[in-house]
Amino acid sequence: MGIVVAAILFSYFFPSQTTLEDNSSEYTISNYHITATYGKNNTLQMMETIDVDFATLKHGIFRAMPEVSTVKLFDENGNEKINGKFRLKYGNVSANTHFETDSSGDVFFLRLGSENSYAHAHERYKISYTITLDERFALYDVFYFNLLGNLTDTTISNFSATVNFENPITAESTVYVGALGSTATITPVWNAEQTSFSITAQNLGVGHGVTALVNLPENYSTVQPNFFWDWFMLVAIILVAIGAWLLFKKHSNKSIITPVVQFSADKKYTSADVGFIIDKRVNTEDVASLIIYWAQKGFVNIIEDGKKTYLSRTEKEFSGKMYEKQLFFAIFSHNNPGEKIDIKKIGLSIAEDVGEVKKGVALENEHLFNPKATFARGLIIIMTSIILALSICLIATQAVKNLFFFAGIIVGVASAIFLFQIAKAADKKYALNAKKSTLNGIMFFLFLAGVLAVYICVFDAYADAFFTVFLAFGLLCFASYLVLKFNVRTGVGCAELGDIIGLKTFIEVAEKDRLEMLVKENPQAFYQILPYAYVLGVYDTWCKKFESIDIGAPTFYSGEIDVFDVLIIAHILDHATQSILSSINAANIANVAESVSRTVGGFTGGGVGGFSGGGLGGGGTGSW
């Protein structure tokens, strides 16, 4: 039944509804009296007597009261004094008739009467209940409460109220009456001790309310706001920041990566190894580069026949690392030397092996990366993301901004992804060109700006007394810096990376005279470096440098070209590698998406001073 009542009241309790349905033809209230006692413990003891005249058959009446109130109040100078959402808790309900209570959509429902019987033409309902006000509202030293809410859907002939206080009230007090937003007032009559006032009002129309605004003596309430979660967040942010710094100092390798120019690749590393070392990832491109690597070592021939490209194994006995053997024999296990394989169909036969080969490459070179450092960096990311989510969720809860609670979860997850992307960018920064580095920088900046915008929106001085959302944002920036600077490589890994960067630099800046000397010393230098240039992203650069240098035709190629041209060979090798990538993609194996495409709630209101319906509580009365 509570759900049914909620549905009935739906149109009443949403801001989009501008008018309240008039049900005075069905029932009216002849007398409505309220006695409210505001205690120094920040609670209200409410007693209501309601005389109702029913014109049609009804079971009774219901009271609908907000569990969340939005209060906006300005002082006499027009300065904002209160602006926030506050919770109210209802309890100790009793009545002189059968009643039921329910809570739905931040509204507390009290239904009087029974569905098994109908009310008499004239009924008197007596109810009492306790309202515990939001403890932080006590900070404002003001009693701003809707004695009669603006959502009653019938007329009230006579309304009266008595409000009691534990201590004398000497400050200014005002009582507003009328429709929502009305600034019309009625004069309260205080007793001699200034501890109680009474008011009366006649002929209140549909949607008319009565709101009392009483300035209380300083520190009137004995209830002290609980800042436990504020302190918790502040301490948590500081501890995570300190912990992140200690993890960085202890586990990040302090070695400076020094590029040393190399004229050839270290023979102990395959092109797939180098592809992993440069960016801590094994791409499908790294695996495909092994075709060129094997070709220049004499294990594979590349054959052009018309518009098709084929591979064949040579008579040379294959030797290589375990993951090389797994891939090589996955390709050629059913083929004799010299037997051609359509390169576009290779992916279908090696689909299940490529994933294992990637693991093999990473395992082969795991000694170059410190697993403890990788774990420590990941821990920084997780801790920071949790704090970011909590900072918003806690404030959203205290400020009663439910939408931002989910925003906090989203920000936490997005921040984890963001920080892991920074870690990924840090690992592969030597593999990125200037354009991609700049693009990453712009994306990271936009993300930080977006998070800051969320923090500005969610910030609420009432709910975040210590400004923890901005401290959390500072933690995000600090963690981003640490993650970006975190070096997870071992000492050997740093040295090897320096050599690889030196080789890449040599490929990029080597002049013709030096290359001619290199070819004279080692005629196979061009082909030996070619697979490494491929995984380092400088394949085209390396090939173009040899346009006017005689390096001789490759022994591993046979086709229909009459005159050898290095760029034609480069294109053929690139095409062969791309064909393998395409066929792997067609096989739909895991992690193939990286294949290269080279070329290479509540009741609201506001106003100066105060107005009817602008305070805490209220709600309305209806029949059922």
Image (spheres, rainbow, N blue to C red):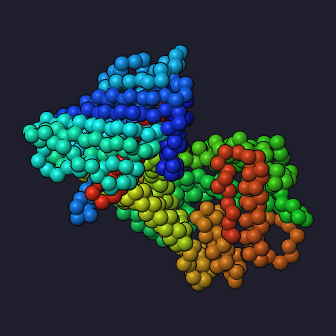
Please name whichever residue, 140 or 7, is drawn nearer the observer in this view of the structure: 7
The reply to whether residue 389 is visible in this rendering is: no
- The x and y percentages for residue 156 are 40, 38
Q: Is residue 74 left or right of residue 556?
A: left
Compared to residue 21, the image places residue 449 above or below, namely below
- The x and y percentages for residue 61 are 46, 28
Q: Residue at 40% of width from left, 50% of height from top? A: 179
Please name whichever residue, 321 or 243, is drawn nearer the observer in this view of the structure: 243
Q: Residue at 88% of width from left, 64% of height from top? A: 307
Q: Residue at 52% of width from left, 72% of height from top? A: 434
Q: Is residue 346 left or right of residue 265?
A: right
Please name whichever residue, 551 or 121, is drawn nearer the observer in this view of the structure: 121
Please name whichever residue, 3 or 373, is drawn nearer the observer in this view of the structure: 3
Q: Residue at 25% of width from left, 62% of height from top? A: 79
In the picture as drawn, the residue positioned furthest to the left comes out as: 193
In the picture as drawn, the residue positioned furthest to the right comes out as: 306
The quadrant in which residue 620 appears is: top left
The quadrant in which residue 123 appears is: top left
Compared to residue 340, the image places residue 503 above or below, namely below
- The x and y percentages for residue 3 are 53, 29
The reply to whether residue 536 is visible in this rendering is: yes
- Total number of numbered labels? 0
In the picture as drawn, the residue positioned furthest to the top comes out as: 116
- The x and y percentages for residue 323 are 63, 45
